[in-house]
Image (tube, helix red, strand yellow):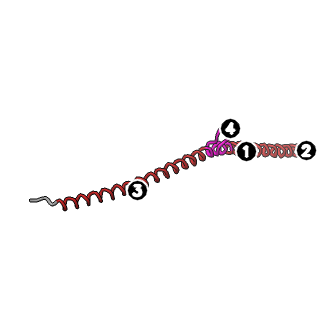
Amino acid sequence: MPVDNNHFEREMSKIEDRLRALELQQQKTSSHLEGEVTNLVRLMSEIRDIIKRHDTMFFGTNGNAGLLTRLDRLEQAEKTRQWTHRAAIGTSLALILKILWDIIMTHGVSH
């Protein structure tokens, strides 16, 4: 069987065209991916900044109390306020009872 050189050259030309098209598509894809990686790096940096701000807000920094410390202080102050309030009520009731007892004892003895 004779070899047809024209057929062989046409097939080689088709293969080369397809190879060029694939190389061009690969370059476009690579360029797109590089852009996406750059965007992801930028987004990760922004996310780290947000996390750092939230850490500072919740936990504070050197000398500055964060929300958790402030909340703890408020809870402690509320417990102290409640104790003081209850102690004042108890003292007031005891004083009122003492005054009433003194009145009863004074009027009860004289009559």
Q: Which residue is mark 4?
A: 63
- Asked if the stretch drawn in magenta spans residue 62, the answer is yes
Residue 81 numbered tag: 1
- State whether the magenta stretch is mostly helix, strand or loop: helix
Disc 1 crowd rating (10 Å Cα; few below 14, some 14-19, many 20+) is few
Task: Give the CA separation, mark 1 to mark 4.
Answer: 26 Å
Label located before the other in sequence (1 or 4): 4
- Look at mark 3 in the image and give the residue it sits on: 28
Amino acid at circle 1: Arg
Residue 40: x percent and y percent?
A: 48, 51
Could you say where residue 71 lies in the image, as x and y percent from the top left?
A: 65, 45
The magenta stretch is 56-73
Query: In the rendered structure, which disc, 3 or 4, sits on the residue that comes first in sequence?
Result: 3
Question: How many angstroms separate mark 1 from mark 2 (CA)?
Answer: 43 Å
Task: Name which residue type carries label 2.
Answer: Ser
Give me the residue at 30% from left, 59% from top: 17
Task: Name the element at disc 2.
Answer: helix
The residue at 54%/47% (across/down) is: 45
Q: Which mark is residue 12?
A: none
- How much space separates mark 1 and mark 3, taking CA atoms? 69 Å
Where does the N terminus fall, quadrant-wise? bottom left
Separation of residues labelled 3 and 4 (CA atoms): 52 Å
